[in-house]
Image (tube, helix red, strand yellow):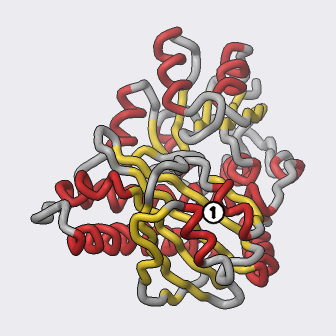
């Protein structure tokens, strides 16, 4: 009898990759869900005896799903599959009843080992390989998924350095005109002033700029976490901005390059603006950013008044190479 398996992830690319990593001989019937609410409906309908669950999803995230399954004692063995690799994220999902944790991008060996370790894997000759390719994955979805993984790498490094828990959003990915960049930064209030750092990067056929928008109200708390003296000093603020940029931009680009199997060279960071609005920043630098593929991530640190936006702006000429590289992840 086939085992009902649920793959719950808001990314079509991630669902497809997850399905392809399941052992081909495992007799399963797969159901897909694009958010936590859909996932719970599937579990209640008996379609999720084994669940592979993402954490960052719209409508209802993975933490909420785990909490509901635990509270209602729903019959599901849940394995979390996430790009959020922070130690505290592991601890929290285990406390909420998750069986185990798999880091994105998923490998077939990691899945097989966990299934065997917990005695879940029962083998037949059923081949599920043809089920995953039926899902349609577009460029935006694929970019959002690689951004999700890279975002988790950067957050994990920041969390370890500062001994904090970094709250992660769903990455926002869009092809934008420069006039739309301000609108894309939904997390930044119009009344909030920011300081900005820019760092160019280039690889084989891919180039762009990483833009870190650090909310000015966050400087004091961040300086204290970093153990810096005189947290309100202007020079200290510049140091905080550059150090945060080095961590987040460097780790994020490293996560992207690993997934695309390519290397990026990075320019020296440049401070673009100090205590200005996003509108002013974009207006003053409009000539640098024309039509662009933008990845936006809003990082927040739990229990601290710290918020910053990381924006990766890929040139329009980079899009064909990105599409080509991402095609290999889907084959």
* 254 relative position to 185: left or right: left
* Foreground pick, 155 / 329: 155
Element type at mark 1? strand
Task: Say whether residue 231 is left or right of residue 254.
Answer: left
| Residue 185: quadrant of the picture | bottom right
Residue 109 in sight here: no
Out of 325 and 30, give the one closest to the viewer: 325
The x, y position of residue 258, in whole percent, is 55, 74
Please state which of residues 9 and 301 is positioned toward the viewer in this rendering: 301
Give the residue displayed 67% in from the left and 76% down from the top.
Answer: 314
Residue at the disc numbered 1: 295
User: Residue, x 67% and y 36% (percent of image)?
Assistant: 8
Residue 93, x across and y down, in percent: 42, 33
Q: Quadrant of residue 324?
A: bottom right
Q: Tell me: residue 54, above or below residue 106.
A: above
Residue 90: give x, y in percent of width and height.
38, 41
Q: Is residue 256 visible?
A: yes
- Relative to 83, is 10 on the left or the right? right
Residue at 61%, 28% (x, y): give it: 60
Which image quadrant: the C terminus? Answer: bottom right
Residue 92 vertical position relative to residue 65 in the rendered view, above or below: below
In front: 171, or 235? 235
Q: Residue at x 68, y 33 (%)?
A: 35
């Amino acid at each position: 009898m086939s085992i009902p398996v649920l793959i719950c992830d808001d990314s079509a690319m991630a669902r497809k990759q997850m399905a392809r990593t399941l052992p081909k001989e495992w007799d399963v019937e797969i159901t897909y869900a694009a958010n936590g609410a859909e996932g719970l409906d599937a579990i209640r309908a008996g379609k999720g005896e084994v669940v592979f669950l993402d954490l960052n999803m719209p409508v209802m995230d993975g933490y909420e799903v785990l909490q509901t399954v635990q509270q209602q004692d729903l019959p599901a063995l849940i394995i979390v599959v996430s790009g959020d690799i922070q130690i505290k994220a592991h601890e929290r999902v285990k406390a909420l009843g998750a069986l185990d944790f798999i880091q994105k991008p998923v490998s077939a060996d990691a899945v097989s080992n966990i299934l065997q370790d917990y005695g879940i894997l029962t083998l037949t000759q059923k081949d599920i390989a043809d089920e995953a390719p039926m899902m349609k994955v577009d460029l935006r979805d694929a970019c959002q998924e690689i951004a999700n993984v890279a975002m988790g790498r950067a957050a994990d490094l920041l969390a370890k350095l500062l001994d904090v828990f970094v709250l992660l959003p769903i990455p926002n990915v869009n092809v934008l005109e420069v006039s739309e960049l301000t609108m894309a930064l939904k997390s930044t209030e119009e009344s909030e002033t920011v300081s900005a750092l820019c760092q160019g990067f280039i690889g084989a056929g891919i180039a762009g700029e990483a833009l870190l928008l650090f909310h000015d109200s966050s400087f004091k708390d961040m300086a204290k976490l970093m153990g810096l003296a005189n947290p309100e000093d202007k020079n200290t603020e510049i140091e905080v901005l550059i150090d945060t940029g080095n961590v987040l931009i460097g780790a994020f680009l490293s996560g992207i390059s690993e997934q695309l199997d390519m290397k990026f060279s990075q320019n020296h960071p440049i401070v673009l603006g100090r205590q200005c609005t996003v509108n002013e920043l974009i207006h003053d630098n409009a000539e640098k950013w024309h039509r662009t593929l933008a990845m936006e991530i809003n990082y927040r640190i739990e229990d601290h008044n710290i918020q910053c936006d990381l924006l990766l702006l890929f040139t329009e000429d980079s899009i064909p190479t990105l599409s080509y590289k991402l095609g290999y992840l889907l084959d």
